[in-house]
Amino acid sequence: MKIGKTSIARSAICTADPHTIVVRGEDLCRDQIGKLSFTEFFHLLLTGRHPTPVALALLDATLIAIAEHGLVPSVQASRMTFAAAPDALQGAVAAGILGCGSVILGASETAGKLFVEVEASMNAGASLDDAALDVVRAWRAAKRPIAGYGHPLHKDRDPRAHRLFDVARDLDADLRYVEIALAVERAIPKVLDRTLRMNVSAAIPAVLLGAGFPLEAMRGVPILARTAGLIAHLYEETQTPIGFALSNQATRDEEYTGQPPPGVTLSNE
């Protein structure tokens, strides 16, 4: 029975025989192990191409920028899961990564899609600022999130965004999408009636798209980076456990808004 468009499993990524492992047309042991950095290998694995020096430096920079930001929700989910199941490191990592969506971590992909739409409007003849304004208005009318703008802590522009843009400029990288990201930032107050400064989730596609990184894999950058951060937190959890403390703090601060059973007075009322 055929399900889907093909009945034969095909992949250009990897194959092996008893003597050789081939990854993207190269001998893993002869050509890659000990010769490529992990970031370079990831780019090759993903795209089938070795990255240019600029693309490699920007990918490295973005991975470092998004790997760690303290006890954010993904880290808390991971550490509390590990506290309950310390025999399942993989489950605790997965618990943290499963929240990669339109608000946290996955916002880079959404921001990248917005930037590509602005670019398409420019290619149709609109100016940079007009294109950004039109797309932001359209997204707002469709109730789509303007991802990558605003941050609960970094009310001014996220310092990581500033640094990624500096790195891109120092590398003489293609800044097309950086200019688009800045134009979107300028357009937001005209549509939302408030200022939202760019955060790192918008800066990541702004620098990577110009280096040829595929939009369809953009969410993979924060997923890969945050995985490294979660493993660090879970190792710390084995040494200095706080998973149950995090759970206890939530319970301590909880306010029950339901009704007690008839005749029962709850002690926390």
Image: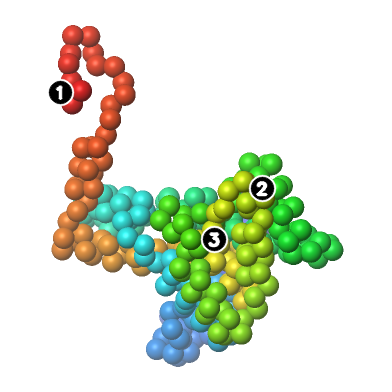
Instruction: Determine whether, in the image, residue 29 is placed left or right of residue 166.
Output: left
State which tag comes first along the sequence, 3 or 1. Answer: 3
Q: Nearer the viewer, mark 1 or mark 2?
A: 2
Identify the residue at image location x=19%, y=53%.
242
Residue 136 shows in this picture: yes
Q: Amino acid at mark 3?
A: Met
Identify the residue at image location x=58%, y=66%.
205
21 lies above or below 207: below
Task: Compute the Cα span from label 3 to label 1.
Answer: 45 Å
Secondary element at tag 2: helix
Q: Amino acid at mark 2?
A: Val
Please state which of residues 1 and 48 is positioned toward the viewer in this rendering: 48
Secondary element at tag 1: loop
The x, y position of residue 90, in whole percent, is 32, 58
The x, y position of residue 131, in whole percent, is 75, 59
Instruction: Determine whether, in the image, residue 121 is placed left or right of residue 59.
Output: right
Task: Compute the Cα span from label 1 to label 2.
Answer: 48 Å
Please state which of residues 231 and 192 is positioned toward the viewer in this rendering: 192
Residue denoted by label 3: 198
The x, y position of residue 254, in whole percent, is 27, 34
